[in-house]
Amino acid sequence: MKLFLFILLSFISVTAILSGLMMIGYPDGSALNLSPGLIEGTPFKNYMVPGILLIIFVGIVNLLAVFYNMKRDPKRYTWALAGGVMVCGWIITQMIIIRSYQWLHIVYLAMGVVVILISFQLKGKVII
């Protein structure tokens, strides 16, 4: 289970950082095939600020969880839990703001929930 958690955290952090960089580099969303209409009605003019926020809140937090897991730091599961909460929070906020969802939202939301559940179990906390 530790390896699976490590793989999930790594995948989430890498894809969040790369996606965020593409949103910053191509704020019109073209690099990720994002429709300009998708961001209409949101607080953002383009995808640059969401890209920065994605890197900070999802990418870096999950990357820190990866590093703490590699070091076998005592707080590694706390960081993993934070990473799972961040990805779930990001996806839920995104779906609320854009008022729609795609299949990838469900996939990343599920990954975030799995990270949370595994982190709780490895921390020794009872979930139910």
Image (tube, rainbow, N blue to C red):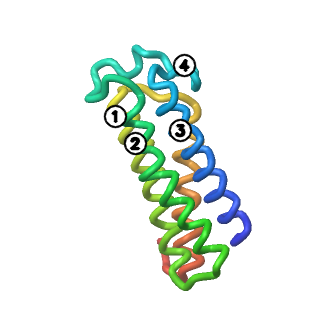
Q: Which residue is mark 2?
A: 92
Q: Which residue is mark 1?
A: 96
Query: The residue under label 4 is which amino acid type?
Result: Ser
Image coordinates for residue 67, horizontal then vertical, percent: 61, 69
Residue farthest along the front direction in this orientation: 25
Query: The residue under label 2 is which amino acid type?
Result: Ile
Q: Which residue is mark 4?
A: 30
Q: Which residue is mark 3?
A: 21
Placement of the N terminus among the 4 image quadrants? bottom right
Q: Secondary structure at mark 4?
A: helix
Query: Badges 1 and 2: C-beta atoms under 8 Å apart?
Result: yes
Query: The residue under label 1 is which amino acid type?
Result: Ile
**Nearer to us: label 3 or label 2:** 3
In the image, what residue occupies the spot 60% across and 51% down? 12
**First in sequence: mark 3 vs mark 2:** 3
Disc assigned to residue 44: none
Splitting the image into 4 quarters, where does residue 63 fall? bottom right
| Total labels drawn | 4
Query: The residue under label 3 is which amino acid type?
Result: Leu
Q: How far apart are the alpha carbons under marks 4 and 3? A: 12 Å
**Nearer to us: label 1 or label 4:** 4
Query: Badges 3 and 1: C-beta atoms under 8 Å apart?
Result: no
Image coordinates for residue 20, horizontal then vertical, percent: 51, 39
Q: Is residue 109 left or right of residue 66?
A: left
